[in-house]
Amino acid sequence: MSLFLHQLRQMARMMVGVPDYDAYLRHMRDHHPDRSPMDRTAFFRDRQEARYGGKNGGKCC
């Protein structure tokens, strides 16, 4: 049951655009062990900038 709830929570986060920090940490550990991962705040800001555009080259509404 807990696996189902975890997957449901993960799916809901993806639907609203909330990035998965734990998946990012696993990826960094498995694929980039020589690099330090971003902290949660920096990760969230990075994902938001990637999704909505940053100061340079962002879309205008």
Image (spheres, rainbow, N blue to C red):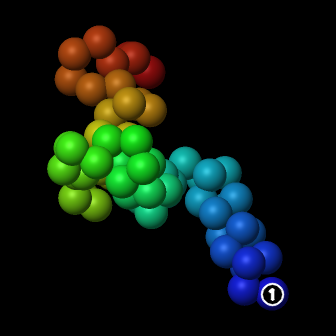
Residue 42 x/y as whole percent: 22, 50
Q: Residue furthest bottom?
A: 1
Q: Quadrant of residue 49?
A: top left
Q: Residue at x 72, y 85 (%)?
A: 2
Q: Residues within 10 Å of mark 1 (few under 14, many from 20)?
A: few
Give whichever of 61, 1 is nearer the camera. 1
Residue 18 x/y as whole percent: 50, 54
Q: Is residue 19 above or below residue 2?
A: above
Q: How many marks?
A: 1
Q: Is residue 24 visible?
A: no
Q: Is residue 1 left or right of 30 when viewed as pictured?
A: right
Q: Quadrant of residue 51?
A: top left
Q: Quadrant of residue 9?
A: bottom right
Q: Is residue 58 above or below residue 3?
A: above
Q: Residue at x 44, y 21 (%)?
A: 61
Give the position of the N terminus as an image quadrant: bottom right
Q: Is residue 1 visible?
A: yes
Residue position marked by numbered label 1 in the rendering: 1
Q: Residue at x 67, y 74 (%)?
A: 6
Q: Is residue 52 above or below residue 6?
A: above
Residue 30 x/y as whole percent: 42, 50
Amino acid type, label 1: Met
Q: Residue at x 60, y 59 (%)?
A: 13
Q: Is residue 18 left or right of 37 when viewed as pictured?
A: right
Q: Is residue 27 left or right of 14 when viewed as pictured?
A: left
SS for dot 1? loop
